[in-house]
Image (cartoon, grey):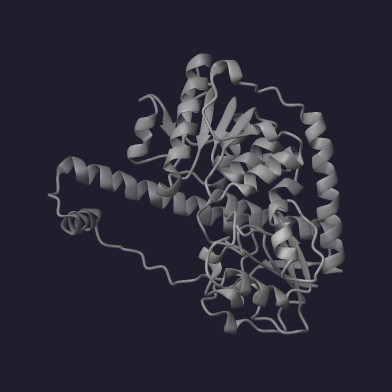
Amino acid sequence: MKVGTISFHSSNNFGCVLQSFALSETIRELFLDACVEEINFRRTLLQYDNRPYRIQYEDKCKQEGTSPTEEGYAEFEKLQLGMQKRIDRFRDFRNQYMNMGEVIYDMQEVDNDKYDVCISGSDQVWNWGLTHGYEDAYFLEFSDDKTRRIAYAASLGIDLFNEPGQVEWLKQHIKSFDYISIREKSYLPYIQKITDKSMPVCLDPTLLHSQSFWGKFEKKPEGLGDEKYVLMYALGYRWCKECEEKAAQMANDVAKKNGYKIIHYYYGELKNWFPKDSEHFYFEGPQEFLWLVHHAEYVICCSFHATAFSVIYHKPFYTFHVPGNGARMKDLVDTIGIPDRYIDSVLTEDEWNFDIDWDKCEEKLEEQRRISLDYLRKAIS
């Protein structure tokens, strides 16, 4: 049996790559005879600037109307070299652990007879802002009726249908699926209004695997010492700067109280939210991300997958509300019985409560794993 999966695996984003890898590994464990391949769809042909960094920097200054400086050039070169390391780490992870198909820029190039089963998901494959215009890929419309089409733990990634035509858009395109499951319970009432298909709520694929599974893929970042630290993870998006600043403040408070350092994800000006002895992991890859979550004393984040891996590794954590995009994190912590982990304001020291009953969480998580795995068995068989 040949199974093709499609998601956002080509994005150099920790969650995108790890959830895609996790789903393929789950299918291999459930169906030992299955040949699972990542449908290697890329939306655009990436054009890399191979000119010397000094010339790139001077062009950047010209566009911004600023004057080049030696200090500016040194910082630009440092950033470019770091970004190349990041790209290499993600590429190496895909090449070593994921079965990547040939790169495809036009889904019409896919041979209809190549796959017996195609699966879209998990992640935000139904996010209007991300996949509108690419329906043939993420709604599996490139395949014909001989192929079983499955959506696994699909996510809208937004709290409401707030774009004109969005409801009709989704209604039209989910018709292509033989089986549907979604990731967020919050979306269920909305989606049930536009389709008569039954759909369970399934776990993000990362949560289908245990600590011991993920531990096999961890890698300690080069040059990192043995100091205890608070991990603060958010992506630095302008539209959620306010909530990220709150998360940074709380991370600072927790670190200061305990005498720990901070490791964060910011490279640019937002790193000024933290003490000068803090470190960033902006240039790291998925394996280093796993290690950093696993070995953190505390995790403060504005991220779904940082939340998911904090749960997997049983880390004391808080997740901050992200406006318009928070259902993902809230539904997860609600599902496993720790709704107080999801907050929208900085807690005072008296309000901190990092004690989590992980045995109870695991009981609830195990039930959700059963539902998710039963769905995959039924849909793929």
Q: Position of residue 83 (x, y in %)?
A: 39, 50
Residue found 55% across the figure and 68% down from its top: 131
Observer-nearest of 59 and 270: 270
Is 202 located above or below residue 289 in the figure?
A: below
Residue found 47% across the figure and 17% down from its top: 256
Residue found 78% across the figure and 60% down from its top: 27
Is 231 located above or below residue 159 in the figure?
A: above
Q: Is residue 97 left or right of residue 128?
A: right
Q: Position of residue 212 (x, y in %)?
A: 74, 38
Q: Position of residue 176 (x, y in %)?
A: 71, 77
Q: Quadrant of residue 94?
A: bottom right
Observer-nearest of 40 and 222: 40
Is 375 located above or below residue 67 in the figure?
A: below
Q: Quadrant of residue 69?
A: top left
One can see residue 373 in this view: yes
Q: Position of residue 173 (x, y in %)?
A: 65, 76
Q: Quadrant of residue 78?
A: top left
One can see residue 216 in this view: no
**Residue furthest toward the left?**
67
Q: How many marks?
A: 0
- Quadrant location of the C terminus in the rendered image: bottom right
- Quadrant location of the N terminus in the rendered image: bottom right
Observer-nearest of 131 and 51: 131
Observer-nearest of 81 and 234: 234
Residue found 52% across the figure and 66% down from its top: 163
Is 335 located above or below residue 40 in the figure?
A: above
